Image: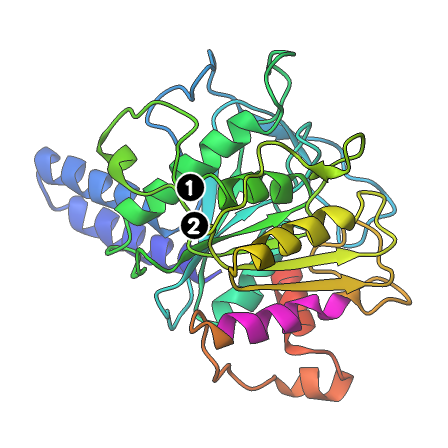
Amino acid sequence: MIYFKQWYTTLTTAVSFSIRSSGLVIALLVTVWSVRASADGKNISVWPDLAPGETSREVGEAQPTRPNEDPPVTRLIKIRQPSIDAFFPEEPTGTAILILPGGGFMKVVPDKEGSEAAPWLNRLGIAVFVLRYRTNETTPADEPAWRRPLQDAQRALRLIRTNAAQWKIKPDHIGVLGFSAGGQVASILHTCDDVAAYDPIDETDTQSCKPDFSLLVYPWNVLDVKSGALLSAIRISKKSPPAFLVHTHDDRSSSLGSVLIYAGLKRYDVPAELHVYENGGHGYGMRRVKNSSIGTWPDRATDWLIRRDLARSNMPPPEQSERESGTSSTEAALVTENRAIN
């Protein structure tokens, strides 16, 4: 990946120069390289110390992959210290999207419902941040499963805004993309009117924790099946930002939840767009599903982002192999990303 090459070049230059320098300069160069590495992409800690309510700093462990999945899917458990992975575009527009993967709160899926969206969004000039939020092994029984992931998402948005100038991001062009359980968290985040779910701890928490727009992709269990209404934590108002929603008719996590979110936004005249596909199930992320057109949802989202001046309209043309195979630009980007991470 391009960022690894940049880090390697920086490190090699630093080491070569440091051999001829004093111990003080060596220490300085190591510090500068460490800051650069953390800013450029991997393992950026969300909290400066322990996350709220936690007593350990476990970054999570991967479960064994499943033999029937190609490409393999990563599932992380035991996350006590949340972090974000960053993917920056070569030609930034100033827009950034925080991705909240799914996993039913018991796990987090950072690739299929996270990093696999990065090539598509980077081509649009959008910076991407994939959040590895806390899983629910230690969550008390009387605490909603979404609460700690919500805290992590709010803190991550504030962290992105704090570093907006350094990362070439416009502070008022920062949105969220939530898949499945991450979509449930994103739905609550979308409607919390900038009210944080944790007490401020430092200067970063003076920033807004409200997204400027949201993409909610098969948000999981946002419908209270007993009452037929949205979860009580989803409080749509005229202050809610614009939203793009995707669901399938045959999803066991009923599409009526997405329909009610759209209806609520419509009621308050908040710009919104809803796509309900006949089939495709749940958990597809950016991947195609046999005998379904659900794989076209990123193209619809691209149109929406461009119309709202959040993305580049002049994307690079498809590569020759892409034209010959007949795959979409989104699918080709996914194939490229799969080759890079596997």
The residue depicted at 47 percent of the width and 15 percent of the height is 54
The span picked out in magenta is 295-306
The answer, for residue 36, to whether it is visible in the render is: no
Position in image of residue 124 (x %, y %): 49, 72
Q: Which mark is residue 57?
A: none
- Colour style of the rendered protein structure: rainbow
Image coordinates of residue 186 in percent, x first then y, are 56, 44
Is 52 part of what is drawn in magenta?
no
Q: Is residue 154 above or below residue 342?
A: above
Q: Which residue is mark 1?
A: 193
On the image, which quarter does residue 47 sit in?
top left
Mark 1 residue type: Asp
Name of the residue lying farthest toward the right: 291
Q: Secondary structure at mark 2?
A: loop
Whether residue 37 is situated above or below residue 59 in the rendered picture: below
Q: Is residue 297 magenta?
A: yes
Determine which residue is flagged by label 2: 239
Given residues 58 and 201, the one toward you in this image is 201
Q: Is residue 206 above or below residue 287?
A: above
